[in-house]
Image: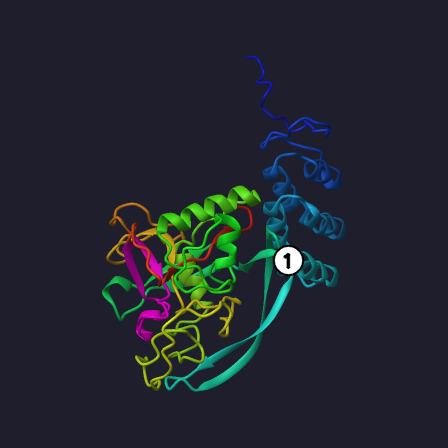
Amino acid sequence: MAENENQPREYDAVLGGQSEIPLGAAVLGGIPGVKTRLASPIVEVRIAALKDALKYGEAGLDLILEAWRDESMQVKCAAFSLLQDRNEAKVKQNLDKFIPIFNFDVITVNAKGEEISRRPYSANFFPEDLGDGFVLEMVYIPGGTFQMGGTENSSEQALHQVTVKPFFIGKYAITQEQWQAVMGNNPSYFKGAKRPVETVLWQDAVEFCAKLSQKTGKNYRLPREAEWEYACRAGTTTPFHFGETITPDLVNYKGNYPYASAPKGLYRQETTPVGSFPPNAFGLYDMHGNVWEWCSDRWHDNYNGAPTDGSSWETGGSDYCVLRGGSWNHYAVYCRSAYRDGVTLGGGRKIFGFRVALVSGFSAF
């Protein structure tokens, strides 16, 4: 039988040049082989080479650090995923340089809304240049497993375990100036460059993601519902990432309808600029209140049959799409981490906004 010339043999070696490297091909071993594959025009080949580089100690680490200069954000994110938990000084210095860190305090309150702790945290992010001085800050969310859902509403049931892969999500909801930079208009009722864009249909949010992807060369999209709740909770299991309740000092909501034992408070009757209130432990702002945020999933009345891998649930269900987080015009109970709502695709009121997400690590953008 004639040998298949396209089948890689264990003694084959790719010597570089302009030829593309087959994904399954055997290559030169050791550091020279890793270097050869890192010169490939194929992103997946470069990512696979980075994984192999870890086998070669200091020399391998240096190659992974060098990957921060790669033009592909996917390769940069792969390098970040490989190095994020390492303790070498030069690794930490480069992590801060290429995916910078920002610092913040995380506040926890009791059922009366009284602050019981304030702890320093940090998170990694990268700035996406939208042109004309406008920047979109994307925060890195480490993957993990959490209990999704709640017990206060039938649509939040049943509680189920979900595993979410690492991803990036907007530090803030998309602002009016960011929307203007990408879409060239501003549909918002409450005008303000730093306020979240609102009066946005689900289709409008999807179109924004498509145009942003075309502008940046990355695959931006709406968050999946499981990603959204995981990002909102940031490791907490309480009704809010702040703890047992919220107050108008922490969240923009209908403050005269409190939750748990919190007192009545201010009802602002409008949106507020993003970042006006403290973030959660992932460094995300306004996950409770201000504007409802669109997710990619179609609405289902409960979690029976829901995916457990963090994927978007788009089969079955209704023509409605999922909204999360509550708004400036909603009671505190509707702003809980687990609370969910569904609205027709044609729905777009001055309480509806969104933030964008981006896959991290080894998954294709």
Q: Residues within 10 Å of mark 1 (few under 14, many from 20)?
A: many
**Residue 341, above or below 248:** above
Where residue 1 appears, as percent x and y from the top left, is 55, 12
Look at the image and give the residue range highlighted in magenta: 321-343
The picture quadrant where one finds residue 322 is bottom left
Residue 196 visible here: yes
Q: Amino acid at mark 1?
A: Ile
Percent x, y for residue 111? 37, 84
Residue sitting at 61 percent across and 43 percent down? Answer: 47
Element under disc 1: loop
Q: Is residue 96 above or below residue 311?
A: below
Front in this rendered view, residue 67 or 195: 195
**Mark count:** 1
Going 68% across and 32% down the picture, which residue do you hit?
A: 27
Left or right of 211, for residue 50: right
Q: Is residue 86 left or right of residue 215?
A: right
Residue 329 location (% of width, % of height) = 33, 70
* Front position in the image: 50 or 57: 50
Residue behind mark 1: 99
Up/down of 73 relative to 105, above or below: above
- Residue furthest out toward the top: 1
Please check the rendered image and state whether residue 160 is part of the magenta-colored stretch, yes or no: no
275 or 118, which lies in front?
275
Q: Residue 121: percent from the left, percent from the top?
A: 57, 72
Residue 315 position by quadrant? top left
Q: Is residue 332 magenta?
A: yes
Q: Residue at x 42, y 58 (%)?
A: 354
Residue 219 visible to an observer of this rendering: no
